[in-house]
Amino acid sequence: MQTLLLGADAVEDHAAMPAVINAVAAAFAADARESTIMPAKSYIDLPQYNGDFRSMPAYVNAETWDAVAIKWVNVHLDNPRDHDLPTVLGTLIYSDPETAFPLAVMDGTVLTRLRTGAAAAVATDHLAVADADSLGLVGAGTQAYTQLDAISVVRDIETVVVADRDTEKQQAFVDTFTDRFDVRAGPIEDAAGCDVLSTITPVESPIVDREWLGERTHVNAIGADAAGKQEHDERTLLDAKLVIDNYEQCTHSGEINVPWGGGVLTDTDLHGELGDIVAGTLSGRTDDDGITLFDSTGLAIQDVAAAHVVYENASDDGDGTAFSLVDTDAT
């Protein structure tokens, strides 16, 4: 038996967004059914290198498929300046849950980007108004592209407003999508007034005021991924139907972590986890809802789901590099 090596290009080629969205939705539903195993992230802090490593293992039984994987990912803040490398580098090992054989080793950086967009699309599908046709983006980095690609699968997006303090990034985004959407650069206030808003910034003080949001805007809060980060006005969090991806992660390092730590938010302010909505045991958007907000921290089960899609498609297409990684001699 051989292991399949899949680089960044192969991952992107074989991760068709509709399929990734469906797989991530299935993983959320499996989690709600308690058909997943997802230990907490473990960290190796390396302050001497201004960085850390994180291990993210998970098993998903999605009824029609099951899979297990572990992602090894870092955050090294000095990489771009000192080493001409990305801040985040990820590697994922995808294994056969029955035999433990490593079926694939694949790029985890592109995979993370895709599954994050897919999770926002799942939340948007359940929480945004059905006729949503405008999308606001705060932050014009790589994830903004994936947010638009993913959300436009579940809603007929026509108008896009992108806000970023880097005007070159803003214009590059506009230029990329101008043939597909009515897209323009604008201030945060304009982006926040759209039917759907995705915020993808690393800020530690809120930059989106409650007053800027539309009456029934759905918000995907993506940027907060560490303690102390917060993109949205506390009033928004108190007013919105507040849906989280995972209780432990969100209260520790998600959009809600700062007001949660300060006692501004409590359990009574949370509508629940997205998995329960996908599984049908908790309501999504109702006619009475105004603003909805999804707090996305990123879960290992999402990585497993996206990796499943990539591996199956790459195997079917005969893509990737097969190599002997482990000794399979049982004698």
Image (cartoon, rainbow, N blue to C red):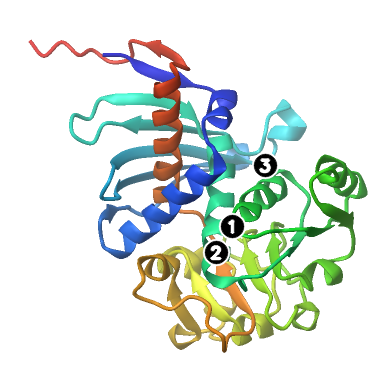
Q: Residues within 10 Å of mark 1 (few under 14, many from 20)?
A: many
Q: Relative to residue 135, is residue 10 depicted above or below?
A: above
How far apart are the alpha carbons under marks 3 and 1? 34 Å
Q: Secondary structure at mark 2?
A: helix
Residue 318, position in %: x, y? 43, 16
Q: Relative to residue 9, is residue 52 depicted above or below?
A: below
In the rendered structure, are the residues bearing label 2 and label 3 in contact, judged by CB atoms less than 8 Å apart? no
Amino acid carrying label 2: it is Asp
| Mark number displayed over residue 77 | 3
- Image quadrant containing the N terminus: top left
Amino acid carrying label 1: it is Val
Q: Secondary structure at mark 3?
A: loop
Q: Which mark sits nearer the N-terminus, 3 or 1?
A: 3
Residue bearing the label numbered 2: 125
| Mark number displayed over residue 115 | none
Residue 6 is at least partly visible in this image: yes
Closer to the observer: label 3 or label 1? 1
Q: Which mark sits nearer the N-terminus, 1 or 2?
A: 2
Residue 274, position in %: x, y? 45, 67
| Mark number displayed over residue 154 | 1
Amino acid carrying label 3: it is Leu
Q: Which of the pair 35/87 is nearer the observer?
A: 35
Residue located 18% across and 34% down the image: 98
- Kindly indicate the quadrant of the structure image that contains residue 326: top left
